[in-house]
Amino acid sequence: MNAAEEIALLKKERNAVILAHNYTRGEVQDVADYTGDSLELARRATQVDADVIVFCGVWFMAETAKILNPGKTVLIPDPSAGCPMADMITGAQLRELKAQNPGAKAVCYVNSTAEVKAECDICVTSGNAEKVMSRFAPDEKILFVPDQHLGGHVSALLNRSYTLWPGFCPIHAAITVESIEAARRLHPGAPVLVHPECSKAVRDAADHQLSTGGMCQFAKESDAQEFIVGTEVGILHRLSKENPEKTFHPVSEEIVCADMKKITLENLAACLREMKHEVCVPEDISTRAKRAIDAMLAV
Ligand code: 13P
Ligand code: SF4
């Protein structure tokens, strides 16, 4: 029996559901019940009947699934899979920022720790940030953490000014304007899709700024046959699988999130077999963080 066959058996035995992010390895996406972006996975996590959720992605995503399902067992195949951007602000740093800005609303990108979410009024993902932020009055004082790029992208779209925490994704930071121009020369006419975690110069050099779920939807609906994709390369698996007649070119093959790649079929099978690496969130933090996530899901 190979790992994929063992996972299928264990999943039934444990009454488990497997959720996977678009950046995970192709073979992990193929055994998942659902593959999606952060928003799609957070929504999916609220609709689960199973007793066990195995979250194939990074820690903050599994933590979000646990916060939304405090009564279920949430497992992560490798608990060391983290998000460096999420760790760029602590709860204490956010409390200090709030103290310096009395009356301001605190908004966090979902790529943040539960402790940071617990300090926030609302959460956003790259898939809903514009919609959620448009609900605030134009003159509302906003503290946006931790991603300066997503915050900058939305503030420009809505023509508003936010206090931006200087966090960033080190993986998307490696995408450059030069690499986009080189990809355009190789594939003339192909639309360039980039993630809003890219720098402003890169976002400006692209044609569309989309969440990973937004890229999948765009690729499906577009008449284009070829696309240049400026985000983590794991998404090419889903894009090609859903659109076998279309071609997807990564801006660079080197845009790889090592943390997402920590999830393998082997550690996924092992975590189901041994029911190990359970995600736990202290109740006081979970209750407060859930308010910020629920406020987002209600929009
Ligand atoms: P998405 O919500 O667009 O999938 O983004 C998550 C992420 O971590 C991007 O780096
Ligand atoms: Fe975090 Fe960047 Fe990896 Fe997304 S790609 S999980 S933001 S480090």
Image (cartoon, rainbow, N blue to C red):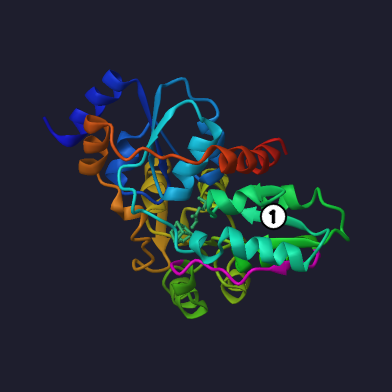
Magenta-tinted stretch: 159-171
Whether residue 160 is in magenta: the answer is yes
Whether residue 34 is in magenta: the answer is no
Residue 110 lies, with reference to residue 98, above or below; the image says: above
Q: Quadrant of the N terminus?
A: top left
Residue situated in front as seen by the camera: 17 or 289? 289
At 40% across and 51% down in the image, what residue appears?
Answer: 23
Residue corresponding to mark 1:
107
The answer, for residue 233, to whether it is visible in the render is yes
Secondary structure predominantly adopted by residues drawn in magenta: loop
Q: The residue under label 1 is which amino acid type? A: Val
Query: How far across and how far down the image is residue 206, in percent?
Result: 58, 68
Question: Within 8 Å: ligand 1 and the Cβ of disc 1?
Answer: no
Residue 277 lies, with reference to residue 272, above or below; the image says: below
Query: How far across and how far down the image is residue 194, in percent?
Result: 54, 62
At 58% across and 43% down in the image, what residue appears?
Answer: 285
Residue situated in front as seen by the camera: 67 or 133? 67
56 vs 49, left or right, is left
Q: Quadrant of the C terminus?
A: top right
Query: How far across and how far down the image is residue 150, in percent?
Result: 62, 62
The answer, for residue 41, to whether it is visible in the render is no
Furthest-left residue in view?
1
Query: How far across and how far down the image is residue 77, in percent?
Result: 30, 42
